[in-house]
Image (tube, rainbow, N blue to C red):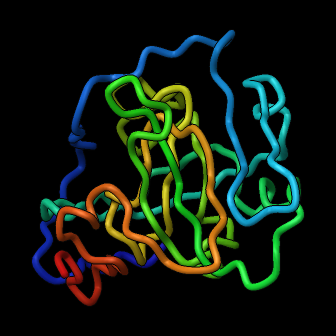
Amino acid sequence: MLKKLPPGQFETEKWPILHVGDIYEFDEETWDFQLFGDVKEVVTLTYQDFMKLPKCVQTVNMHCVTTWSKFGTTFKGIPLRELIKLVDLEDDVKYVQIYGYYEGDRFGYCANMPLDALLGDDSLFVYRWKDEHHDWQDLDPKHGYPVRFIPPESFYLWKGTKWASGIRFMRDDEAGFWEELGYSMTANPFKEERYR
């Protein structure tokens, strides 16, 4: 795997924990995942439905806007493209917001991205991980258990929504949680797109 440090970043072997708000407490009975927005019909998945979806294993590099980069973490999860197969999109859908729990609100956090950048194996809703210092293990609650989104490395990691709860499909781009506070809409680490 190519190991290229974006400008302004330093390499770490740790996986630092950064988040805002409280840590979501998973309850399988009440958890679900919604696919909504510019779709013909809203789809709601239970935890069991979600975990039955096809999975893949992918090794990715992560780059945080706070300047750390971690290379070569391997994740197991459900590719975003598998979720797209479950909905009938309206015409001209080009963007998504990926939602997650924040302060008790299941849609309190979100991050925007262009849909066409998320169709590969490196766009995963992950639940297990390993690296050269750790064997396979479930995500812990602080890292987003039961499932979080890991974006391609062409996005800073704030686009990697923790405690993921749904995807809104959109024709037009809209700012998410951090973007509303002045962070970049496109967030490419290799172009150092940290802020608007």
Lateral position of residue 169 relative to residue 140, left or right: right
Q: Position of residue 164 (x, y in %)?
A: 53, 40
Query: In the displayed structure, would residue 104 be above or below residue 107?
Result: above
Q: Quadrant of residue 12?
A: bottom left
Residue located at (63% from left, 71% from top)? 170
Q: Position of residue 67 (x, y in %)?
A: 13, 64
Q: Quadrant of residue 95?
A: bottom right
Along the line of sight, the residue nearer the viewer: 55 or 160: 160
Lateral position of residue 41 relative to residue 139, left or right: right
Query: In the displayed structure, would residue 172 be above or below residue 83?
Result: below
Lateral position of residue 151 relative to residue 43, left or right: left
Residue located at (67% from left, 51% from top)? 57
Residue located at (69% from left, 41% from top)? 34
Quarter of the picture holding the C terminus: bottom left
Residue located at (56% from left, 46% from top)? 75
Along the line of sight, the residue nearer the viewer: 146 or 176: 176
Query: In the displayed structure, would residue 95 be above or below residue 66?
Result: below
